[in-house]
Image (cartoon, helix red, strand yellow):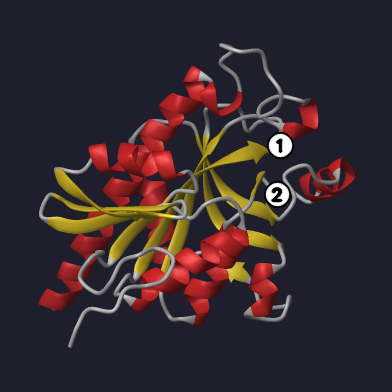
């Protein structure tokens, strides 16, 4: 039987590993792959860029999801159809708490479903919760790295230029940061009996006007800030270390 190719990510069975790191930015996929021991570019179509390689003998892939939950849902759906089982979002986020600073890392335990795409899969009462084992592995690896890391809730929204009063409301409820993909990733993974987690580099704080926004040519702000770039490098390394932790746990259970 001929290999059947997924229509958006342009990959088929055998092209991706069970472990997949999923950044939003297509350019970040190549950066992630540079941390693998070896890798090959599998596909590049409509913003979905995929690399597959290995780290310490563990087969691992990276695939971009684009911006927002609808695009992320497409990536997760198609990756799951061809064998992906564990998803780790490697992204950026805007802080909603003053003690969460630019260049810090957030490990999400769950996401507020302020998006529309996840409601196509489950009623709003269904929680978007990260997998415990994946979250534990990410948090453990992040703490071992001695980076500033925060563990808690994130807000997933469809509107980047959204209602500031709404962000303030979630901030008062203790939500750590805002981003645009985790809710549908967690929801889909839970429904499909798969695993998903998220690690996010903080690129500013919209409540105090710091981070992504208009800037002068050559200015290093938002995601271009050196502190954010360093945090992105660190979260990639942490996500890879978490994959190793998860694989070791799997092998340990298999030996029992």
Query: Which residue ends up furthest to the right in the rendered image?
Result: 165
Residue at image mark 1: 97
Using the image as rendered, state which of residue 89 and residue 81 is in the foreground: 81
**Can residue 237 be seen in the rendering of this structure?**
no
Q: Which residue is mark 2?
A: 175
Toward the bottom, the furthest residue is 1
**Mark 1 or mark 2: whose residue is earlier in sequence:** 1
Q: Residues within 10 Å of mark 1 (few under 14, many from 20)?
A: some
Q: Are marks 1 and 2 in contact (CB under 8 Å)?
A: yes
Residue at left offset 66%, top offset 31%: 99
Please report the residue visible at 71 percent of the width from the left and 30 percent of the height from the top: 98
| Residue 234 percent across, percent down from the top left | 37, 33
Crowding near the residue tagged with mark 2, few <14, some 14–19, many ≥20 C-alpha atoms within 10 Å = many
Give the vertical position of 44 relative to 186 (above or below): above
* SS category of the residue bearing label 2: loop
Q: In the rendered image of this protein, does residue 46 appear above or below residue 200?
A: below
Q: Is residue 145 visible?
A: yes
Answer left or right for 92 relative to 89: right
Instruction: Find residue 104 and report its horizontal and vertical position in percent.
Output: 52, 31
Which quadrant, please, contains the N terminus?
bottom left
């Amino acid at each position: 039987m001929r290999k059947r190719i997924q229509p958006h990510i342009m990959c088929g069975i055998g092209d991706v590993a069970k472990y997949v790191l999923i950044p939003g930015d297509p350019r970040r996929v190549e950066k992630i792959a540079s941390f693998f021991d070896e890798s090959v570019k599998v596909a590049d179509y409509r913003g979905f860029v995929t690399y597959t390689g290995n780290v310490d003998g563990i087969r691992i892939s990276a695939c971009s999801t684009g911006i927002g939950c609808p695009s992320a849902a497409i990536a997760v759906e198609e990756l799951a159809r061809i064998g992906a089982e564990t998803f780790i979002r490697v992204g950026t986020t805007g802080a909603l708490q003053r003690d969460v600073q630019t260049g810090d890392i957030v490990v999400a335990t769950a996401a507020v479903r302020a998006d529309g795409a996840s409601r196509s899969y489950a009623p709003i009462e269904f929680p978007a919760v990260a997998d415990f084992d994946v979250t534990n592995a990410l948090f453990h690896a992040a703490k071992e790295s001695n980076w500033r890391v925060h563990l808690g809730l994130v807000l997933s929204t469809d509107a980047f230029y959204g209602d500031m009063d709404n962000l303030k409301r979630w901030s008062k409820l203790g939500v750590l940061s805002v981003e645009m993909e985790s809710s549908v990733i967690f929801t889909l993974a839970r429904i499909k009996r798969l695993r998903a987690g998220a690690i996010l580099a903080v690129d500013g704080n919209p409540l105090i006007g710091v981070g992504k926004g208009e800037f002068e040519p050559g200015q290093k702000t938002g995601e271009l800030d050196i502190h954010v770039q360093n945090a992105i490098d660190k979260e990639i390394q942490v996500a890879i270390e978490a994959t190793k932790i998860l694989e070791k746990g799997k092998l340990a259970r298999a030996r029992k």
